[in-house]
Image (tube, helix red, strand yellow):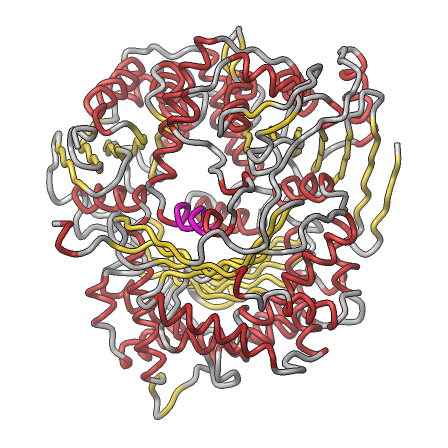
Amino acid sequence: MFQQFELAQGVKLYVRPTEQFKTINISFKWKQQLTEEQAAIRAVLANVLQYSNAEYETNADFRKRLDDLYGAVLYFDTGKKGAHHIFSLNAETVNDAYLSNEKVVDEVFNLLHTVLFKPRLVDGKFVDSIVTREKDQVVERIQSMYDDKTRYAQQRLLENIRPNHPASISANGTVKAVKAVTNEQLVAMHQTILTEDNLSIYVVGDVNVEEIKEKIASHFPFTARSTELSRDVEAAKVSTENGFLHEIQDMKQGKLHIAYRTPITFFSEEFPVMQMTNGILGGFSHSKIFMNVREKESMAYYASSSYASLYGLIFVLAGIDANLQEKAVKLIDEQLKTMQEGNITDLEINQTKSMLSNQLKEAMDSARAQIEIYDQYKELNESFTVEDWVAKWSTVTKEQISQMAQKIEKEFVYFLSGKEGAGNE
Amino acid sequence: MNETYFEQLEETLYHEQLPNGLEVYILPKKGFSKTFVTFSTKYGSIDREFIPLGKTEPVIVPDGIAHFLEHKMFEKEEGDVFQQFSEKGASANAFTSFTKTTYLFSSTDHVLDNTKTLLDFVQQPYFTEETVEKEKGIIGQEITMYDDQPDWRLYFGAIENMYKDHPVKIDIAGTIESIDKITADHLYECYNTFYHPSNMTVFVVGAVNPLEMMDFIKQDQAAKTFEAPQEIKRFFPTEQTNVAFSERSLQMDVQKPKVIYGIKATNTDISGEEMLNYELSMQVAIELLFGRTSAFYQDVYEKGLIDESYSADFSMEKGYGFTMIGSDTVNPEQLVEKIKQSIQSLAKEGQFTEEDLKRVTRKKIGFFLRALNSIEYIANQFTRYSFNDMNLFDVVPALENLKLEQVMQALESLKDEQTHTVFKVVPFEKNGNE
């Protein structure tokens, strides 16, 4: 999919020249082991670098410059993937070909250089007032999760099944960790990112590969760094066999979140089979959970499963009446059990194969999705192609799926709802 | 078949109106692997009072019925339509807004088969009392889900504050009580009135051969029989200029207050070029006054009065429209005060220059070119423009021709405080909660 170049040890450039898009997408991804403390520092650093730099004193000045460049998009972001924290810098710019006599792309490269290599430092430190305010912004971002009941319930589930573990650590850290971040730590982290973190650079668009290689090398003089990080995610520390937790908030709906564990991960030989298995269980609107919990019993508007393959976890989520928790869990248990017993139809298998391959092919219509998918699948095979992966699903059999279902074990039920016996009030 | 080439964008649009009145638009996109097909009717939640097809007297139907109908279209005597789409690798969906209902699928294979499924399921209604009853549980959970979303409650609270009589103030899904009144007969009445091909548009975008697709749709439609088209009579109450409530709030289980400052638009009974120019002038005006490069934004951001949830937008359809400036904030009163000051300061002449206008229109042109990479964006927006007699691809030239005086006029229209309202979602009082 992408042409690859090693710019220095631990610094790789991936380019995909294509006429598909009217814009050029650029993405830098710096990887490090994920811990709460480091995630907090990196999240605040992303905000501080975004706000101002040595050339543009205020964010308004910087944004005005971006607006002038036909609303070029340029932003720092943080995320996680398995055991790793990803600090990223992304840009999207209109291709000069669609504008008359403009040189927007070069200007965007200059801006990328500025935000990375010319931070606004006073006596070797970031501006204290900016650091304080951006720490507040990250704290508020973390706290706002409380208002989104689905995200909140999912986070509570993760904290219960995998405390202090990459599966539950947020890419923003915690409120406590963010409040503890110091100016010195930010300066040090900036240096770490520039000189030590494993780095992948992606470019997608109507570009000349040699020119882009040249531009990247001249604008960003990254030097050699250690190449590989351990990709292993530590095993679960606590056993939460058949755990159950019901928490109460002032709300109307019941949010049911169930966690299952499986030894099959993204790196397992059987990964494509587990993708099929999850698809039949609850990945789509033809799946067993949707057909039974929603269509047959009318108990939910949403009811689905998802497979967090890097952590070996499967989640089932449903929004239900607060009084129907037990009935819903029983019904969902039955769907998994029936798959373990081999009750899987050819129709379900064909539908799931079609939907999985459609999903992957469709994603190729977005430059950002091309980058994200390749960034993950290249860990398995750097010459990953969509066609090869679709072929893996095509040979999966009913017996294999049933065997996979037997490797899914229920671990924890989390339920968030209004006061019990709602309706008595 | 009409063919229009948009030179600057390098896009060709194909269009034909079929004998039964159906509008069909096709936009092929090179290099893309999927095709997106939408089938929309100009019928949404605000169409609650109308004269049913073949009748003479107007009726008022239960709130939430357009959305209920959308759900029920997917169920047929032989089962769920999703099953058919899944078999052919298509992701299908539908949504109902204030003014339209759209059914759609996207797929990378079997595009003609899936198009056939889409056309058939939308044009062959099947409602029974039993299936209607069954759906009430599912939609009840959907309504409850939205009830628990503070941002949705905030948005609707602001609209309810602004509109006294216009049905835009009614939640699209209705309420548990209103949907309980819906019967299969209601659904047929609404279906027969609003799902006539002459009230509908098919839009196809992506990896498609336009000639083959147009022929396919024409043959499909020619083989189906429809009653003769009839003009649909819809009734809307006359809405006052002033807001219904100048300030209200709602307590919910949130960690921080949320506020929307709403400004009711006064000039909304328009369409076509007039609407496009008005809408773009308002959007540019809001960007200048409240956008991320504005003096206002800089000030409230540095004072910690807003966070990453901040937004400022203008949106409209024929008959209603509003500006909304909103954020989660530790101090809603102070933020509201700052917004008011910013609008009042407009009295100063010449606050914005040609250069400001140029910068903001460039930003919007860039946004538009980026959006054209997204088949979903095109599919969702094209029909909206078309239902209002506008063309999505006229946005760039209209922006390029926008005059500063038009924008200043738009800013002027924001000043009347009788059209302003504040809605807040605030945390429960401490003692009541734990």
Q: Nearer the viewer, residue B251 or B126?
A: B251
Whether residue A218 is visible here, answered yes or no, is: no
In the picture as drawn, the residue positioned furthest to the right comes out as B2
Which of the two residues, B88 or B170, is positioned nearer the viewer here? Answer: B170
Residue A361 on the magenta segment = no
Q: Is residue B4 above or below residue A3?
A: above
Dividing the image into 4 quarters, which one contains the N terminus of chain B?
top right
Question: Where does the image place residue A131, in percent across and percent down from the top left?
Answer: 33, 78
Say whether residue A173 is left or right of residue B64: left
**Magenta-drawn stretch, dominant element (helix, strand or loop):** helix
Up the image or down, B397 lies above or below B22; here it is below
* Left or right side of A282 for B10: right
Query: Where's residue B133, x and y in %?
Result: 41, 14
| Residue A241 % position (x, y) | 12, 32
Quadrant assignment, res B347: bottom right
Residue B111 in view = yes
In the picture, measured across the screen, residue A205 lies left or right of residue A224, that is right
The mark total stands at 0
Question: Nearest the camera: B213 or B252?
Answer: B252
Residue span colored magenta? B151-158
Q: Is residue B282 above or below residue B149?
A: below
Q: Position of residue B318 (x, y in %)?
A: 67, 45
